[in-house]
Image (cartoon, rainbow, N blue to C red):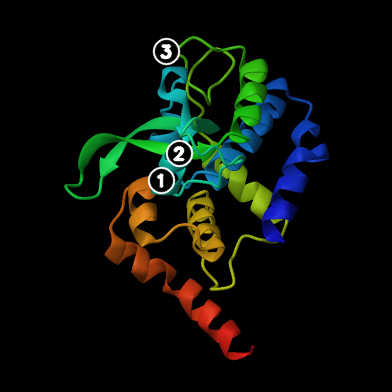
Amino acid sequence: TEWNRLTNLMHGKWRTDSKSYHSRYKREVLRIYVLVLGNTGMRPGIESLGLKWKDVSELKLNKQQIQDMQAQQPNTNNEDGSVVDTVLQFRVEGKTSAHQTEGQRMVTARLNVKGWLEELKELTGRTDKEDLLFCMPDGSPIKDFTEMFRDVLEILDMRYGADKRLRTLYSLRHSWATWKLREGKLGYEQLKLQMDTSVAMLEQHYDHVEADDFAEELLV
C-alpha cells in the first residue's frame, strides 16, 4: 500500500508541479530512480548513481538457467532448452561484502524495468555507452536525490516506518528484499548474490519475514 502511494504521487502532478525546469527534470529522473531501486535491491548512491549505459545489458535465458538463477518464472515451457525469457543485467561497481573492497557484480532485473530505462533515455537524451543513466541534462551527476526523496516521504507522512526509524532511499533496498522473501522464489543464498551481502546479515535484517509467515500459518 505504501509503495503504491509513493509511486502514484511521483507519477502524478508532483513531478510537474514546479516552475523550474531543472526541478521538474530531477523529479522525473528521481521517479525512475526509485522504480529501479525498488525493483532490483541495488544500493542507492555509488552503486546505482554510478551506472553508465555500457553497464546495462539483456540476457536471454533458457528454462534451466531461469530455474538455476531463480530470478523469475519462465513465460513458456520450451523443453528443448531454447530461449524462454529475457532479463536485464546491471554491472554494478561497489563494495564486495566478503572483503569490503571495491569490485563488480551483476544485478538482475525483470525485463519490465527496460520500459523505465527507455523513458530515462528519452528524458535525458544521454544514450552513449559512457553516459550516466541518472544525470543532469548536461550529463553531470545528480547530487540531491536524498533530500528530494525525504521531501516526498514528508508529503506522504511516510518519513518514519512502522519501527519508528527514519526512511531513506536505502529503505527501497530493504523493501525489495522483503518482497522477494515473501514471494518464496528466492532464499538467502540467492539474495546474497543479488544484494552483495552475507547470509548472516540477511538473516539479521529479514528474520521478521519468516516470523510473520510463521504467525500466519498458526492462524490457519
Q: Secondary structure at mark 1?
A: helix
Quadrant where the N terminus sits is bottom right
Quarter of image, res 96: top left
**Dot 2, how many residues are within 10 Å of its Cα: few (below 14), some (14-19), or many (20+)?**
many
Q: Which of the pair 137/109 is nearer the observer?
A: 109
Q: Are marks 1 and 2 in contact (CB under 8 Å)?
A: yes
Hey, what amino acid is under mark 2? Thr
| Secondary structure under the numbered disc 3 in the rendered image | loop
Q: Residues within 10 Å of mark 3 (few under 14, many from 20)?
A: few
Q: Pointer 1: what residue?
A: 69
* Depth order, front residue of 49/58: 58
Question: Is residue 86 in sight in this rendering?
Answer: no
143, 95: nearer the viewer? 95
Vertical placement of residue 191 versus 69, above or below: below
Q: Give the residue at x 46% y 23%.
A: 57
Front position among marks 1 and 3 = 1
User: What's the residue at 43%, 31% (across, down)?
Assistant: 90
What amino acid type is highlighted by mark number 3?
Answer: Glu
Residue under label 3: 130
Label whose residue precedes the other's in the sequence (2 or 3): 2
Q: Is residue 142 visible?
A: yes
Check disc 2 and report the residue beneath it.
108
Q: Is residue 174 above or below residue 51?
A: below
